[in-house]
Image: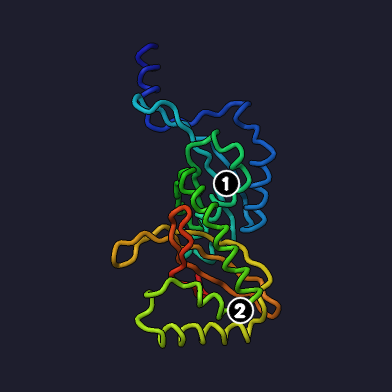
Amino acid sequence: MKKALLISLLFVNLVFISCKQLKVSEEEEAAMKEIAELYGGTCTYTINWKVSTKSGKTNSFEMEVSNSDFLNENIKLTEMFASNIAYVFFTHVKGQKQKYNSVKSSIVYKDGGKASFDYTLDTLQIVDTKMAYVKKVIGVLSDSGIEKVNQMIKRGIFKNDEDQRDYFNKLKSVDSTFGKVIDFTPAGFQFTKNKNGMQLLHISGNLKRSKQDSQFGIFINPGIGEDEMYVFGYDY
């Protein structure tokens, strides 16, 4: 009996289901409701406990979205939407974030395939902090237009001023067609690096406009207190 107990404690991943864990907080319930409203289908959860003799007991909150027509139709954007599922959850529970070490997003597809991504709370906190800068950029776009956004781009990103001017003239034509930006909704994020090895945070979203909604994508400096924008465009 003691041997069996010892073996169970050495498992890397243990999932405990108890009456206490089956009860989610109001914030957790609101988060899962918003996720279900965003993507449709079914949103379920599991609390995963990991036991390590070095770092002690840790746990993560896993959300699994299945039977979503939207996610099945956009399988190429799986990682982006998975990151947004984790971020939406974080925005609801960040006041009680000490309950978890990470948030896991899983998407189950109609062919039986499953994609899962883990996000530490530190990662989600960085994204949440930088989202304030993204809101500022979108606010400038809404109030003053794309030319003011152009002035916020870090110098030296484009080869020359002419290339940058041509690029933003194309964006300006999109604005004239789709109309004024009213609001935006995040769609996901990814930490990446450019060809020089510089760390970047890519945030994608959707713009609500007066005529026709559109996508947007922005690459920014992920450093806290470093409000720098490198690329802005009207696609994810």
Q: Residue furthest left?
A: 196
Q: Which mark is residue 90?
A: 1
User: Is 73 placed above or below 58 here?
Assistant: below
Which residue matches tag 2? 145
Q: Position of residue 62 (x, y in %)?
A: 52, 42
Q: Residues within 10 Å of mark 1 (few under 14, many from 20)?
A: many
Residue shown at 45% from the left, 54% from the top: 113
Residue shown at 56% from the left, 72% from the top: 215
User: Amino acid type of disc 2?
Assistant: Gly
Q: Residues within 10 Å of mark 2 (few under 14, many from 20)?
A: some
Q: Position of residue 165 (x, y in %)?
A: 46, 86
Q: Quadrant of residue 159?
A: bottom left
Lateral position of residue 210 relative to residue 193, left or right: right
| SS under mark 2 | loop
Q: Earlier in the sequence, mark 2 or mark 1?
A: 1
Q: Residue furthest top?
A: 2
Quarter holding the N terminus is: top left
User: Is 138 placed above or below 106 here?
Assistant: below
Q: Position of residue 212 (x, y in %)?
A: 66, 79
- The answer to which of 22 and 196 lies nearer the viewer is 196
- Tell me the mark number nearer the camera, choosing from 2 and 1: 2
Residue 81 can be seen, yes or no? yes
Residue shown at 51% from the left, 86% from the top: 170
| SS under mark 1 | helix
Q: Say how the picture is coloured.
A: rainbow
Q: Position of residue 96 (x, y in %)?
A: 60, 36
